[in-house]
Image: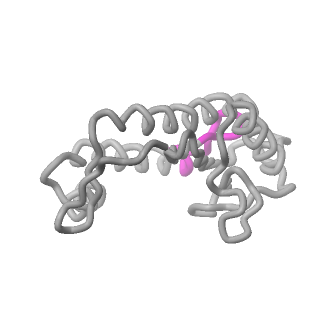
Amino acid sequence: MKSSKARLTKDGIRLYDVAEFGGMRNAGRLAAEILDRIAEHVTPGQTTAELDRLITQWVDEAGAVSATIGYKGYQHASCISVNHVVCHGIPSEKTLKSGDIINIDVTVIVDGWFGDTSRMYVAGGKPSVKAKRLIDVTHDALMKSIEVAKPGNTFGDIGHAIQS
């Protein structure tokens, strides 16, 4: 990453120059592409460890670095949460079953910029009625938060939109 010309606000928030957005976009794009690629592998019978192995391979092939490998001793390129695990699940030999809800979180570093994103999947593509409701409600909350996330609004504004 080239030296940043970022300014700090009185609250310590870093403001970046428009020219730096390209680096941010590249990192975010790679993380999103990895989540696109993994989708076809999120199937019943697959293990979360194998999904992580594929993600590790694709990060390496892209010439990027996984931001999670080595972080506080963590040994995986992703966090994979299944069903009731809310976030940051650890990949394992656990086998996915049809209807499982899986969230995969990937964070990559490209030229010093971090791209961090996650996506929800359903193994086998057919969630239960209860799981479908959870997926719909969380998607609606995400869309509401994106709508409110704009200059001048606070994190409290975003939280309020999500909870409304």
**Residue at point 59%, 30% (across, down):** 33
* Residue positioned 65% across, 57% down in the render: 68
Q: Position of residue 55 (x, y in %)?
A: 73, 40
Q: Can residue 117 be seen?
A: no
Q: In the rendered view of the protein, which quadrant contains the C terminus?
A: bottom left
Q: Position of residue 112 (x, y in %)?
A: 53, 46
User: Which of the 4 quarters of the picture holds residue 109?
Assistant: top right
* 121 relative to 81, above or below: above
- Residues in magenta, as a range: 121-132
Residue 29 pos. (x, y %): 51, 32
* Residue 146 at least partly seen: yes
Residue drawn at x 29%, y 56% is 14
Residue occupying the point 77% across, 60% down = 75
Out of 109 and 97, give the one closest to the viewer.
109
Looking at the image, residue 5 sits to the left or right of residue 106; the answer is: left
Residue 38: x and y in percent read: 69, 34
